[in-house]
Amino acid sequence: MELAFKGGCREVGRSGLLVNGEILLDYGIKAGDPSEYPQNGMEPKAVLVSHGHLDHCGAVPNLMYLDPDVFMTPPTAEFTSLLGRDTLKLAESTVSGVAPFDPEDLQKLSQRTRTMDYGETFKTNGYRVCFYNAGHIPGASGILLESESGESLFYTGDFNLEETRLVPGAAEFPEADTLVLESTYFGEDHIPRKETEERFIESILETLDRGGTALIPAFAIGRTQEVLMLLDAHGIRAYVDGMGRDVYKILKKYPEYLRNPELLDRAFGRAISVKDRQRDSILKEPSVIVTTAGMLNGDRHSII
Ligand SMILES: [Zn+2]
């Protein structure tokens, strides 16, 4: 198989891997002002999207003029569309002000997308494809691609072997001739998750004790839900902003992609929604606010 990396090497963002000039795995945006995109000038017949984070799916709407076949899991399809709408909104408020695609592209993307669940083998343009649970966020997939001649490639996308509160750990990955592995944190020793969680909770309780406000910036897709579940498990009631709630509403439709839907419901049931006009009044009393990082700059739309 011939691989061409179009972005996402030695950098975080704008992932794009073209296989044999015909199948594109991910097509993301590197967020910024201005944002960066993978190299273009290719003509993939099909696009397979590993998961619904901006750096992996954000630029897929840009390819709609090529009429590609697009495949992803149902949650990834919803997140891609949510992020697409957010990108359009964000373009209105940035310095460059140029949207990378228009609303018609988003509409076309949803028409061209076929959703596939984990473990469902399907065919596109002579290739066999199967998505495997990658354990990263709900719907995140490792992608197995097999050419007609029997050569195989497994592309992990972002993955996590260990379970989190939100999702179970990655499925056992299949054997393949070629493995393309996400390695953002390769070579770094991680403090055990439990210990990290304990320190995190401790620092929040200390902040509240001092009469302070704990502002927790978190990506809207995956991280916000995980953090709220963690806080809820420790009896800490938090404020959450709109985008994290929108994602929760999507997740409610796909309980089979979650580790424990009831605990997610409980966490959001107890959390308090932040309305824009309430921000100032919330900050006057000790509180915990989970928000997309953009909100800290007064811009709630930035969600990676
Ligand atoms: Zn990701």
Image: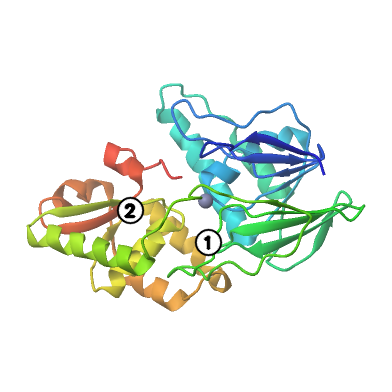
Residue 149 at x, y percent in the picture = 92, 52
The residue shown at (68%, 36%) is 5
Query: CA separation, marks 1 and 2?
Result: 26 Å
Q: Which residue is mark 2?
A: 241
Most distant residue in the top direction: 96
Q: Which residue is mark 1?
A: 160
Relative to 1, residue 132 above or below: below
Residue 7 at x, y percent in the picture = 61, 34
Looking at the rendered structure, the number of numbered marks drawn on it comes to 2
Report the amino acid beneath label 2: Asp
Q: Residues within 10 Å of mark 2 (few under 14, many from 20)?
A: many
Asked if the beta carbon under badge 1 is closer than 8 A to the nearest atom of ligand 1, the reply is: no
Left or right: residue 33 versus residue 36 is left
Relative to 229, residue 42 above or below: above
Q: Upstream in the sequence, badge 1 or badge 2?
A: 1
Residue 124 in view here: yes
Disc 2, SS: loop
